[in-house]
Amino acid sequence: MVAIDTQYLGGYNRSGRVIASVNALVIHRSLPYSTAKSIDERLRFMNERRYNAERQLIRYAPHYVINETTIVQTLPETEAGYHVGTAFYNYTPLARQLMGNEKSANNVTLGVELCAGEGPIPQKVLQNALPLVQHLIHQYHLQRHQIVRPFELVKQIHPDLIMDALQWKAFLDAVYLPERVY
């Protein structure tokens, strides 16, 4: 596995909340308006203050960010991140099931972001993610249905922004069938 570099995000992107439990692992893809492939660019992007049309601060903080050469841990696994939204009415039934009595899916999930430009996620990024994801599923005893993409938890996210269905299935097969060559 690629060595994990710890570079915790600062200030407003830190929730300060203790994660209630890890009930799922959310695999993100860097957003299409961010073509940043380098971790430094991605971390700068995440640490910049951004606001939506209503002038509300946009917060984004997954626990890990991975590109073709690097894995960076941006939050402790014990701290809730900002990576799957907070509007309860936008949560899917799966999100509500995972949340139990929690008010936010962020309180019960870890976020892993895969840095990639447009098109399929590069194989090297997926290869770097594979051992980390395998480690996390073993550490938190997660089943295949608990490894999800953001649109499976939040209604407003379009599936095409994450990973196509064939690449997703191949990735999950590699996670759960390590004897297969990826």
Image (cartoon, rainbow, N blue to C red):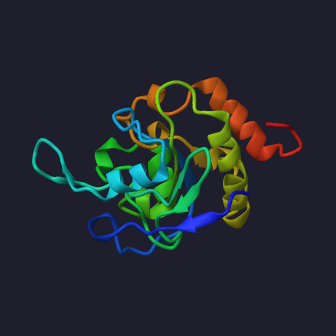
Q: What is the quadrant of the C terminus in the image?
A: top right
Residue occupying the point 26% across, 66% down: 12
Residue that protrudes farthest toward the left in the picture: 54
**In the figure, is residue 69 to the left or right of 170?**
left
- On the image, the x and y values in percent for residue 132 come to 67, 56
Residue at the right extreme, as displayed: 179
- Observer-nearest residue: 14 or 149? 14
Q: What residue is rendered at 83% in x and 43% in y?
A: 177
Q: Which quarter of the picture shows residue 59?
A: bottom left
Would you say residue 60 is visible in this rendering? Answer: no
Residue occupying image coordinates x 51% and y 37%:
116
Q: Quadrant of the N terminus?
A: bottom right
Is residue 168 depicted above or below 55 in this figure?
Answer: above
| In front of the other: 29 or 98 | 29
Estimate the x, y position of residue 34 in percent, counting from the top left.
Answer: 37, 38
Q: Return the x and y of residue 115 as percentages of the image width and height.
A: 50, 42
Residue 128 visible in rendering: yes
Of 54 and 127, nearer the camera is 127
